[in-house]
Image (cartoon, rainbow, N blue to C red):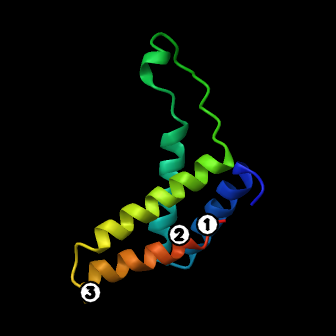
Amino acid sequence: MNTPRELTERISMDMRSAMKARDRTKAEALKALLARFSNAEAVPTDQYRNDTEVARKSLALSDLYTILDDEINELQQAAEQFDRQSEYRVELEQKIAILMQYQD
């Protein structure tokens, strides 16, 4: 991906495809990642006390990859808390594999 927009559009398209295919694990992983991107664009509330409309922050491609890496690391840490045979650990590992496809 060359731009932040291209990366987020690709992830959004893949999420929609996963939803249509009823791939719950992939859809959840991508939806959570897109939410993290959106949260990172939010402006702190103390910067717009009286305004109702505020422009969101623009994120660089490197910012998005940092967020992606953070999400993967958090999922890996969570997976380590469960037994190898745990259904939840297997699902977390699947989400990790899905997200790793978007690393540059």
Q: Residue at x 67, y 43 (%)?
A: 60
Which residue in the protein does label 1 denote?
Answer: 103
Q: Earlier in the sequence, mark 3 or mark 1?
A: 3
Which percent across, then down, holds residue 9?
69, 57
Q: Residue at x 37, y 74 (%)?
A: 92
Which percent across, then down, holds residue 35?
48, 50
Regarding mark 3 in the picture, which secondary structure is present there?
loop
Q: The residue under label 2 is which amino acid type?
A: Leu
Which residue in the protein does label 2 denote?
Answer: 99
Which quarter shows the C terminus?
Answer: bottom right
Which residue in the protein does label 3 denote?
Answer: 84
Regarding mark 2 in the picture, which secondary structure is present there?
helix
Q: Residues within 10 Å of mark 3 (few under 14, many from 20)?
A: few
The quadrant where residue 25 appears = bottom left
Real-space Cα separation, disc 3 to disc 2, in angstroms = 20 Å
Q: The residue under label 1 is which amino acid type?
A: Gln
Side (left or right) of 55 relative to 75: right
Pointer 2 and pointer 1: residues touching (CB < 8 Å)?
yes
Q: Is residue 83 above or below residue 67?
A: below
Real-space Cα separation, disc 3 to disc 1, in angstroms = 25 Å
Side (left or right) of 71 relative to 77: right
